Image: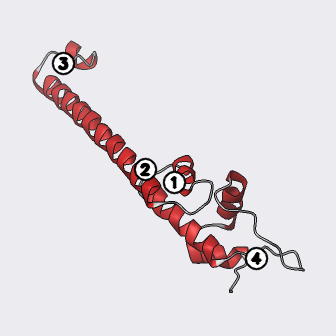
Amino acid sequence: MSTYTIGKLAAGAGVHVETIRYYERRGLIEQPPRSPGGYRQYSAEDLWRLRFIARGKELGFTLAEIATVLGPDGGGSTASVLAAARAKLAAVDEQIQELARVRCRLHQLAELCEDGDDADCVALRVVS
């Protein structure tokens, strides 16, 4: 079984060493065993977890959400990933709808400022 030093693990996962230490403090990865010389010895499983966390963050998951998906056993079941993906998708859809409403109001404001009364423009009077 191959082991990684913290530097090699960081390089393999594309993160900083301090990120790994932070994830250890947050409980996202376990404290690894140490060599007789005191060096941390990480496993391929630790590398997988770091990559899993990175992919989750790229999809907009928070570290707390990722920790929930990984669960207490640390494996992350298909059911937990599916539930998290559906919840995140619903949240993204809601954000899209809110952004569309904001876009519409901004469009109205731009038209008001181009064609309307200066006082209405400065007061940001747009239809909600």
Which image quarter: residue 123? top left
Outermost top residue: 119
Q: How crowded is mark 1: few (under 14 residues within 10 Å), some or many (20 or more)?
A: many
Q: 39 above or below 66?
A: below
Outermost right residue: 36
Give the residue pinned by disc 1. Answer: 69
Q: Earlier in the sequence, mark 3 or mark 4?
A: 4
Which mark is nearer the camera, 3 or 2?
2
Q: Which residue is drawn at 66% across and 62% down?
A: 29
Checking the image for residue 127, the label placed there is 3
Q: Earlier in the sequence, mark 4 or mark 2?
A: 4
Q: From mark 3 to mark 2, how far is it between C-alphas?
A: 36 Å
At mark 3, the secondary structure is loop
> What amino acid is labelled 3 in the image?
Val
Is 12 left, or right, of 106 in this rendering?
right
> What amino acid is labelled 2 in the image?
Ala
List x then y, in percent, for residue 23: 66, 58
Which image quarter: residue 37? bottom right
Q: Earlier in the sequence, mark 4 or mark 1?
A: 4
Checking the image for residue 84, the label placed there is 2
Is 6 left, or right, of 55 in this rendering?
right
Q: From mark 4 to mark 1, how far is it between C-alphas?
A: 25 Å
Q: From mark 3 to mark 4, how far is it between C-alphas?
A: 61 Å
At mark 1, the secondary structure is helix
Outermost bottom residue: 1
